[in-house]
Amino acid sequence: MGRADARRAQAQESRRAGKSGGIRRLFTWKKLLGAFFGIVLLGMGAFGALYLYVDVPAANAMAERQSNVYKYSDGTVLARTGKVNRQIIDLAEVPKEVQHAFVAAENKSFYKDQGVDLKGTTRALFNTVSGKGKQGGSTITQQYVKNYYLTQDPTVSRKLQELVISLKVDQKQSKDEILAGYINTAYYGRGASGIQAAAQAYYGVDAKDLNVSQGAYLASVLQAPSQYDWNSATPTGKKLVKERWAYTLRNMVEMKWLSPSEKAGLEFPAPQKPKPAQGLEGQRGYLVEAANRELEKQGVTEQDREAGGWTFTLTVDKKRQKALEKSVDEQLESKLDREGSKVDAGVQAGATSVDPKTGKVVALYGGEDYIKHYISNATRQDYQPASTFKPLVLASALENESTTQSGNLIGLNTVYDGTSKRPVVGSDTPFNPQNEDGRSYGPISVQKAMNSSVNSVFAQMIVDVTPAKAKETALALGVPDKNFPERPAVSLGTMNASTWDMAGAYATLDNHGRKVTPHIVQSAEHRDRTVTPEKPKREQAISRASADTVTKALTGVVDAGSGSAANTSAYDAAGKTGTSEDNKSAWFAGYTPELTTVVALFGEGDGGRKQVSLTGTANSGRANGGGFPARIWADYTLGALGGGSDKTFDLQDVERGEVPPPPTPSDTPSEEPTESEEPTPSDTPSESPSETTPSEIPTTPAPPATTPPPTTTPPTTPEIPPLPGDGDGRPGERPGGNGAPPQ
């Protein structure tokens, strides 16, 4: 090699050495360390600024949205309302071992950490940036923050917010508050958000009744709700959830929250099959609606309920409710042809059943289906109760110690003139109702008149009492003041009332005259508020003697009168039938010593916009109160009482009333009354000797008790053609009178 070549090689080597030295001088360890700390300080500064900048936000709307739960009296769920199936509960309601199961499954260091997992968060950030999707590893605090304050969006900004907020939440809230928030906001599958809804969805129990094995499953299912639901999981999914359940229990043993022997005794708790959401179909909607109406009166407004989170426990007895539904289905619905018959298509049944001692509504039937027919037939007040009002006329006569036009005290054995179309005496409003089928009974006792629902007798009786006093008694018993004129026709039930209203009135009679107000809400509870329903007043509406006398009369209706379809040896019963004008409604109101129930049928036409006749229901002719309503009542009562009851009515001071003595020759009018007819044995139902003795009712025809003495000239009024009879319902007042009958 020449000198020239040597110099060139030396020059190249120098240049290479210079470059290497320059790089080494540029990246010295001191410079690298300084850069690292600079980056760390910059990051710390940025995080500090982020920490100051990011505040703990208000909860997101979905996190606090809850459902309302309506329960039967035994605590089982009746229905849920609301868009989100969640019911937030306090952590104290969750068993300690179930709390520990969630910590063991998700975050063993929960009680000691600062609320964040930096390693897991860094990994999640990297995977988010690199497009690998969501990544686990967050603490319970971070998951709570994500569910309660933020969203599920897998973005870097949301993850950074989660980190900062978690640190702040851990400083401001206790671990118990954080754990409660986590288990109440997490989604468990099956449409259930929060542990209370999950406990019901998977095991049919409240969260407070979960055991450790069930709690470990719910803690495990959180990782993949759709994949780990035992009833829909693939074999792989079942294997994975079983492994996670076992993993959770092992962690509990490690954390000394569960002993090895306890763990060894646990079996995998396969959950129940999923059930459809309990909405408002069938009778549920009617029960919820009745409860909501009552809650409004108790101060729980619609706005309060819309906020969610309420647990409403109703007085409804689940078994009796099912028995009532079954009786309506078997005794009525199974016999109707709703598709092929215009009459059957418009038949609507309603019923209310009440405990006469407490006023609790134990069962209610609102219609064929709340989704199909939103008007509750149990609480609607647009139909007339018809002859079920007659016992209240008698109650008023007894309570006011009223007398007949002849001055005889009214009681069960008092004799009236049962002539059909007989004009009432002593009223400024003319009224001459027709009896069923135009039948005339002549002299007839009040008991027998009640048995056969003789219109002419009770039309005269309300005049003897006065319509004003009769109305006063009816209102005291619980009949609403709706379309309630003070005229003779009211004796036949021309006002408006619901089965709920009449159940209250009859329950008061059943309760020896002590006022019974039906109610359906037992309790109303919220995490932030508890409403104790106001107890209805239990004052004496009428005397016990008056109430018990009416009960005695109504036992005759069941034993030997129009309510015989309700008669059975399985229980002691009292009741009254009713059929309104033109057969638009048919009723049976009755009671035993333990249960008061009112059943009614309504004829509904034109989509509920008008009332139509029930005649022809199930091809059975006129649908009177002694037919379908009485049969439904009897079947339900038998089931509701568990096949019967040996309890009997404890009746005291039953008022027998006064009967005029047999006429003497000097008292006998020169001319026999032509309006009266002596009833044949088939006209008048038999009566037990305890109710009537031969000496109480004259064997010789006497002037009717309501007929003025012969020396008195009765008021002259033109003969008014009555409206057609309606069975034990009422015809109307005369056209152009003080009030036309409501249609």
Image (spheres, grey):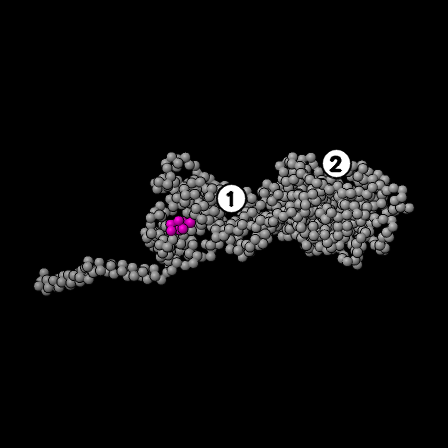
- Highlighted range, magenta: 174-180
Residue 620's mark?
A: none
Q: Is residue 439 visible?
A: no
Element carrying mark 2: loop
Q: Which residue is denoted by mark 1 in the rendering?
A: 274
In the picture, residue 97 is in which quadrant?
Answer: top left
Res 561 → quadrant: top right
Closer to the camera in the image, 422 or 698: 698
Quadrant showing the C terminus: bottom right
Which residue position holds label 2? Answer: 690
Q: Which of the two labelled residues, at mark 1 and mark 2, occupies the earlier sequence position?
A: 1
Magenta residues: mostly which secondary structure? helix
Decide: is 214 above or below 493. Answer: above
Residue type for callout 2: Ser
Look at 79% across and 39% down and name the residue there.
Answer: 696
In magenta segment, residue 683: no
Is residue 596 or residue 88 the one in the foreground? Answer: 596
Q: Secondary structure at mark 1?
A: loop
Task: Check the picture and name the quadrant holding the N terminus.
Answer: bottom left
